[in-house]
Image (cartoon, coloured by chain):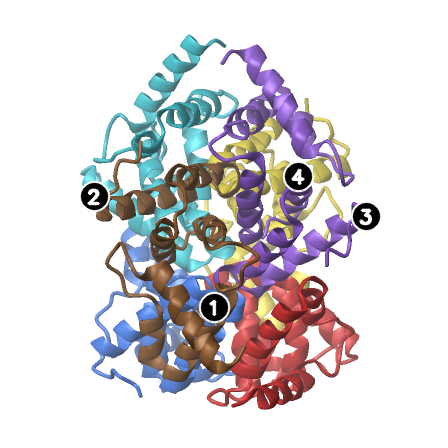
Chain colours: A blue, B red, C brown, D purple, E cyan, F yellow
Amino acid sequence: MNEEEIKKRTQETAGKLFGRGIQMKPPYFLWKDFNKDLANDFSKFITGNLYSRTVLSLPERQMVACAMLAALRARDELRLHVNAALNVGCDRHKLAETFFQLAPYGGMPAVNEALEVYKAVLQERGEWPIR
Amino acid sequence: MNEEEIKKRTQETAGKLFGRGIQMKPPYFLWKDFNKDLANDFSKFITGNLYSRTVLSLPERQMVACAMLAALRARDELRLHVNAALNVGCDRHKLAETFFQLAPYGGMPAVNEALEVYKAVLQERGEWPIR
Amino acid sequence: MNEEEIKKRTQETAGKLFGRGIQMKPPYFLWKDFNKDLANDFSKFITGNLYSRTVLSLPERQMVACAMLAALRARDELRLHVNAALNVGCDRHKLAETFFQLAPYGGMPAVNEALEVYKAVLQERGEWPIR
Amino acid sequence: MNEEEIKKRTQETAGKLFGRGIQMKPPYFLWKDFNKDLANDFSKFITGNLYSRTVLSLPERQMVACAMLAALRARDELRLHVNAALNVGCDRHKLAETFFQLAPYGGMPAVNEALEVYKAVLQERGEWPIR
Amino acid sequence: MNEEEIKKRTQETAGKLFGRGIQMKPPYFLWKDFNKDLANDFSKFITGNLYSRTVLSLPERQMVACAMLAALRARDELRLHVNAALNVGCDRHKLAETFFQLAPYGGMPAVNEALEVYKAVLQERGEWPIR
Amino acid sequence: MNEEEIKKRTQETAGKLFGRGIQMKPPYFLWKDFNKDLANDFSKFITGNLYSRTVLSLPERQMVACAMLAALRARDELRLHVNAALNVGCDRHKLAETFFQLAPYGGMPAVNEALEVYKAVLQERGEWPIR
């Protein structure tokens, strides 16, 4: 894949993930504040390269990404990716169940953080409650 | 659901998850070494109750469980659940892709630990290489 | 222990732990927002079952719970359990000493977070300063 | 407290904590391999200063130390301090209960690691099983 | 080194690190709120003793301290030490590069937190942008 | 920079970092076991791209990398990068001091793991003791 194709795929994938839903500023802009070259390198590597692979479908990829970010208690990043998960069509009940499933592995503080973030994103999207 | 049903479901679910594949001793036996009541309580709560819910199918549940355990760098528990994931039919390429997907969130040390564990489990099951 | 007894014990123990002190909304309500069955299962398992055991007295249990939550840097949960510790009669100087004791194991960022949370809870309860 | 007193207290406290039980080499010797001055500074600060305070009794201090180390999944250090806890008279059932109490906060991988370490220490001391 | 010298060195080193730049209240004051003796012990040990060693120059020490605090996602402490790093003359581009270098080890959530903290400190110091 | 240049730089930088010292198999080979394309992508991104930047010199980069890996308690990766640090000329006393400097931030369990790894690498290289 050449440079032009990676750039195009980066933009397409970023659009699908982050183009709708909550108000947010993806980390790309923070990276660019410090270093434009690195910002582009990271963006192309993560979004253009890794996220554009098709072994996992985008909804499958977002399910495991949200699971990981919840486990890592990475609140801000989880907010971004919970919104992206909803954008690419993840099932809303399955996402909640995933966060409950974290209980025996990451403990309740991690579960609670994830559910709080998830609820706030759903509210901002006007999709709350899910039941 | 009454006591008898939970007990039955605990055993059925445990059988599906841990009944085949690698040599291992599920943590239940360690819990029982210390306290039989608590061991049964934990087992019924986690396996009988949480794991038996059907919002996520067992393969879907194992995908997110493996993602979380890899993120938490919980090596021993990951070994157990990677084997369980294969037992309930998770796609072997998707599981590998999930661990690579951890790179931007949990970092390469976590990715490397997960791939090592996964490779060792596949070897012990006689299913290596996957390509 | 039958269902009715567990339910009763859950409410009694929750009352002792969370019935007084700071303004807060225990995580139970967040869980219930997503799933009433799971909320009850978690609550009965943690509060009704684990927390009602008498091998550790409630003050002893809260001392180790606060120690763990401080180590895990679980700020919100620590706030809840520091208040509960004071409700069940933990010694205020021993609690402070416990957080200083975290220094050689969890590092000063964890110590500082715990002391900040503890000070804010004491202030909200009108019990500050403790010296 | 002058230098001579701190040195004496460091040795006395270290003796009570680490003088009996399992075969082990406290980290002091590793520190000394790299830098004798720093090794003495750390030892005097942690053991002579912090551990010699009496706000918490030694058994109370070891209970919260073990709780923290289990939460941090600091296996080697936990081994050292579980042995020290037993040396200063901590109740063996309360220690096991403490590790089960970690379940809702740190998750089962942390619980399992702690129980494994604890069981191995008890076995090496010839004090297994505890029931 | 006697008591008087350590006290003097503690004050000198603290002045170099924290005497300028952002508005902040070093953790020393929080420690003192709880226990004056321990506050002085911690301060003398960390700032007077460890930070005053010359094997690493102060700028070198702050580079590795910032690297560690970013990896540990210790936001408040990082804010303090990023400011200190700038006070003792660390190169602003090297500090940004250090946080990008965290990507393959600690993951992007840690990188993003560090860059956010760093940008806010630079803004408060009137030194933004650095390019 | 075109593909050919990145590939060349990846090999040159990898040679400087990992070409001498301890027996080891860099993670690249593990990645390749699962997926050759991803292995090359990761390697080019991390080693060819990030590690080849000159804002930090290679010894400066290895100092902060070792600081981070020690903080993250990433034992295997630290082993690799401590060896690389020595290969590119990091000062051996400064590296030890960096690990002691982790004490107030990451706690002694992290310090002890780092010193153990460092000592083992120095022994395998025939460069022990360093004093």
Q: Chain of mark 2?
A: E
Quarter of the picture holding the N terminus of chain F: bottom left
The three-letter amino acid code for the residue at tag 1 is: Ile
- Tell me the distance, in whole angstroms, between the alpha carbons under discs 3 and 4: 15 Å
Q: Element at badge 2?
A: helix
The three-letter amino acid code for the residue at tag 4 is: Ala
Dot 4: within a 10 Å radius of its alpha carbon, few (fewer than 14), some, or many (20 or more) residues?
Answer: many
Classify residue E106 as left or right of residue B83: left
Classify residue D34 as left or right of residue E11: right
Q: Position of residue F8 (x, y in %)?
A: 58, 56
**Residue B50 has which mark?**
none
Residue F59 shows in the view: yes
Is D50 or E117 nearer to us in this picture? Answer: D50
Q: Chain of mark 4?
A: D
**Residue E123 has which mark?**
2
Residue E128 shows in the view: no
Q: Chain of mark 1?
A: C
Q: Residue at x 66, y 80 (%)?
A: B84
Mark 1 — residue? C46
Is B46 or A81 nearer to us in this picture? Answer: B46
